[in-house]
Image (cartoon, grey):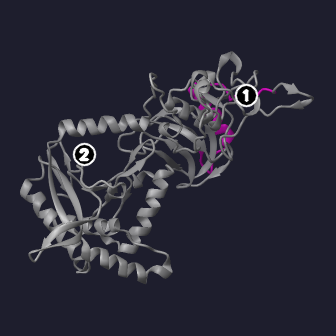
Amino acid sequence: MPQLSDTMTEGTVVKWYKKEGEKIKAGEKVADVETDKAVMEMESFESGTLALIVAPEGTKVPVGAAIAVVATSKEDPAQVKQQYLAASGAAPAAQVASPPASEGRAQPARQSAGPTAAPETTARRGATATEPPPRSPGNGQGRGGRVIASPLARRIAAESGIDLAAVPGSGPGGRITQQDVLNFRPQAETDRSPAPTAPAGPATSLAAFAPKVASGQKTVLAMSKMRQTIALRLQQSMQQLPHFYETIDVDIEELVAARQRINRQLEQSGTRLSIGDFIAKAVAMALLRHPIINSHYNAETGQITSFGDVHLGMAVALENGLIVPVLRNIDKMGLAEIRARSADLVERARAQRLKQEELTGATFTVSNLGTHGIRQFTAIINPPEVGILAVGAAEARPVVRDGQIVPRTILTITLSSDHRVVDGATAADFLRTLRGLLEEPGMMLV
């Protein structure tokens, strides 16, 4: 199990894209793994043949523990598999038992959680042991009372605090599917009102299908892994980092006009720049001029590492939490590339399909709540970064120009800084540079 994020200590195998005996190449996507931040793609480190899947779908594995065994081109996959099983003291994987027949026809032994989902399995001493099919169709109960459910159904149930034993399974052999969990309502809630239909998919949150709480009632929802990590890291940041805040108003009337002109020129290409794209470009340029803001601080060593490239983190709100994909080397991008790359990152972040390098290594972060109508706010620093910029909504406000009150498009931005590294005057200089770039967008071309 690789460490796919800087805070990851364990991962859950969500899906295998390869089966035992299939060829794989180094760098090829072989599995999806759920970390504390998102469901991420895992690539193979070696080329060869997938000899053994040690951790089947739904298995939670510590970082560094075995999840699969790969035989090189010069090795016999079957022999490598047996050697691993013998060394780990495990017996070969059991064969799937024949399911009970009904009406003269064999029932399917499994329900796919996806196009290539594996049968429900459990890992025993490093080997893959296949569970027998359920004996009681319709209630998700297998041999020994074990609940049979897809990995995604288990994850959604765990996040929402739903007891899988109470969920009727609609899959073959009574297997509980993702939709069964999404549509499930306890009997008391069912009696009160019909269950609303909830959107399905890996990014579905508790809020997406949690029922409204009736007057005089209460509900308890389990915190997701992502939510727990957010809570821990932000609490640590506020407790350990001496935050201070500086706020400025920026007149972006000229920027809005420039954006409109450029978008007319780009209309044929289908690209449409946002105000956020200009802000991201200006932030990158300002960071290069004030490298102390574009730094990491190591509290253990007392060292400050300043970077000559800007890897900009972009806080993206998910239905079940927050994620910060990273736009690497944004200082070398033009506005059109920033728009295309950031749109792609946000789309895949919300689909929980980001790669490791797209979630780590940010040198500075921007949190933009302008599209939510928020005029001004302060953001919490994501260590080891030493600053984060909170961007509010661009709106028409009355301002004084040449002794006259006139309407102008004003944007309020707030810089949160780590006072161990950044002084007040330093932060003010950075904001002055940033405001100059935003108020005269032509300076971004110089």
Q: Amino acid at mark 2?
A: Ile
Name of the residue lying farthest toward the right: 104
Residue at coordinates 71% horizontally, 36% vertically from top-left?
111
Residue 134 is situated, as x and y percent measured from the top left of the image, at 73, 24
Label 2 Cα crowd, 10 Å radius (few <14 / some 14-19 / many 20+): many
Element type at marker 2?
Answer: loop
Residue highlighted by disc 1 = 174
Residue at coordinates 61% horizontally, 26% vertically from top-left?
190
Placement of 233 over or under 254, stated as above or below? above
Q: Nearer the viewer, residue 439 or 336?
A: 439
Placement of 372 over or under 118, stated as above or below? below
Q: Earlier in the sequence, mark 2 or mark 1?
A: 1
Residue 307 visible, this angle: no
Q: Is residue 30 left or right of residue 416?
A: right
Residue at coordinates 44% horizontally, 68% vertically from top-left?
340
Residue 313 visible, this angle: yes
Q: Nearer the viewer, residue 274 or 316?
A: 274
Residue highlighted by disc 2 = 380
Range of residues picked out in magenta: 71-98
Placement of 92 over or under 282, stated as above or below? above
Q: Any magenta on residue 92?
A: yes
The C terminus is located in which quarter? Answer: bottom left
Q: Amino acid at mark 1?
A: Gly
**Marker count (numbered):** 2
Residue 105 is situated, as x and y percent measured from the top left of the image, at 90, 32
Q: Any magenta on residue 181?
A: no
Name of the residue lying farthest toward the left: 425
Q: CA distance from mark 2 to mark 1?
A: 46 Å
Please report contact status of discs 2 and 1: CB closer than 8 Å, yes or no.
Answer: no
Residue 137 is situated, as x and y percent measured from the top left of the image, at 76, 25
Residue 114 is situated, as x and y percent measured from the top left of the image, at 66, 44
Label 1 Cα crowd, 10 Å radius (few <14 / some 14-19 / many 20+): many
